[in-house]
Image (cartoon, rainbow, N blue to C red):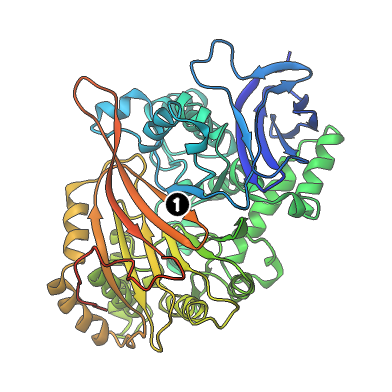
Amino acid sequence: MAELVLGPVLRHVTETSVTLWVETDVACEVDVLGRTARTFCVHGHHYALVVVDGLEPGSQQQYEVRLDDTVVWPERESVYPPSLLRTLAPDRPQRLIFGSCRHATPNALEKLGYEPDALDTYAQRMATEEPSRWPDAVLLLGDQVYADDTSPKTQEFIRDRRPVDAPPFLEVADFEEYTVLYHESWSDPDIRWLLANVPSAMIFDDHDVRDDWNTSYEWRRDIEQTSWWRSRIIGGLTSYWVYQHLGNLAPDDLVTDSMWLAVRAAGDAGVDAGPLLERLAATADAEVDGDQDAAGMRWSYKIDYGRTRVLVVDTRCGRILTETERAMISDAEFDWLAEQLDGDYDHLLIASSLPWLLPWAIHHVENWNEALCAGSRGPRLAKFGEVVRRAADLEHWAAFSDSFERLGKLLASVSRGERGPKPASISVLSGDVHHAYVAKASFDPPGSVPVYQLVVSPVHQTVPGAIKIGFTVGWSRTAAAIARPLARWAKVPKSPVRWERLAGPFYGNELGTLVIDGRVARFSLERALRTPGSAPRLATVNQTPLSWRDDTTADPVAPFPARAQLS
């Protein structure tokens, strides 16, 4: 009898459909509310994607997962409320939660000083609420798994299958070890129930593969000389396609996606699709080197939650890193992004795992470092700059200054109403930097719609004291005044983008929530806290209005004290 290994995980959602992903132990047929799909196989593991369509807008109904006519979900004697399929409603307020950087949650991590897992804590609260309070979607913005920082449980598995006295030591080596990472993370009971009830969208960041992944041309040249990297990157991107990317695709995209059609055909024929996906992974990795023949794989994607447009941007594998070119995303990717900005929507969310707007001083340091590495002050300082870049993780949008400015121009054009009707709000959602904050951008010439940077990180990680000090200092006027001339010395041109910090920095394990009601949007930040003798709880640490009603002229950030703009 077939058994459920992982899932169900709700993925893409529309007003009339919800996509559901599962992993099973053997090949079988998966049935959800009468919609069926056969599993496909990747290196001996079995998966299925079921599109449950024909649903009513704004509806909700309990569901079961059947494998070959046997009910496997909900689990017997489950302590959680029944699992529901809920579709989007055009006239109902939307609730989107987001965050990044979530280490799996075995008890050992709590003993190492981790604060409560914010997503676990959210699931526990959600289980006590009416479904009308549940979020419509969760956006997981990178580092869903840590391939380079494995838990004791994963390390035990690695030791049992290969020697660990040579690279990559106790880091994951291949697809098989990636499956253990995902199983450890998504089989957490609270997370499993949450993902079975809240549609999810995902994108990778560096730790899904390795710290500093694709930070520079020199980094790629060095890592490709190792004996273990090829297996890691192929396994990482293959598993990413299976566990994360496939579910990001809309039903209309699935029917035309060549890789999905090939994988499904392989499954129908009883053929392992692993080699197909490994070739895709190799092609996607080659694009970073500017291989035009390899171009064609786009991990970025669009989701419309009613009148809210979400553009999820790949800022890791989509980079271009050659001896002469350095870009956060390729020209083709920027063209795609620009096309998605055209249209009529109420709210625009750009989901980038890496923050576009950083603390002022850190932004200038990354500008300085990029210019130095490019040889603005000679080859000797270029080598020094590369050492600093890797040691300090100087790899955000600010370290790709041309791309930073190009994204700024696109956002400014939307703010000025040059790409269609003006939206009510524009926000960049990000993670990665292990603290949370709210910033507001302005442009020259100015736009009329506010553009916000909303950063929420981590969901479950430790935050060393040095990081807290560094980012707190990075927001100071004094540090910015010191770093700005440093960038000018490295011949970095002045940017037309300015930004002010509205809130933060906040530290701890956190989740962000966007509540969108027509043209009104607001952001709130909650931190997971543990009180001795009681269960973890979420405490609100910030609330920021992002837009206001069309008949109101009040400044949505009026409750916050004015702060100087620095850049």
> Which is nearer the eye, 545 or 538?
545
Give the position of the N terminus as an image quadrant.
Answer: top right
Give the mark count.
1
Q: Is residue 31 above or below residue 94?
A: above
Residue, far left? 478
> In the image, is 255 to the left or to the right of 375?
right
Front-most of residues 92 and 462: 92
Report the residue that reaches farthest toward the right. 269
What residue is drawn where x is 31% and y is 51%?
434
Which is more toward the observer, 220 or 93? 93
Q: Which of the 4 image quadrants contains residue 562?
A: bottom left
Disc 1 residue type (three-letter): Val
Q: Residue at x 74, y 54 (%)?
A: 253
Residue 508 percent coordinates (x, y): 26, 44
Q: Is residue 20 above or below residue 290?
A: above
Say above or below: 344 vs 143: below
Residue 431 can be seen, yes or no: no
Q: What kind of element bears circle 1?
A: strand
Report the residue at 15% width, 77% height from top.
482
Q: Give the labeled residue for mark 1.
A: 515
Q: Residues within 10 Å of mark 1 (few under 14, many from 20)?
A: some
Percent x, y of residue 259:
76, 51
Q: Is residue 234 left or right of residue 95?
A: right
Residue 68 relative to residue 223: left or right? right
Image location (x, y in percent) of residue 131: 52, 33
Residue 325: tell me if it is visible: yes
Q: Is residue 392 above or below residue 32?
A: below
Asked which quadrant contains residue 175, the reply is top right
Name the quarter where the C terminus is drawn: bottom left
Give the image location of residue 357, x and y in percent.
35, 68
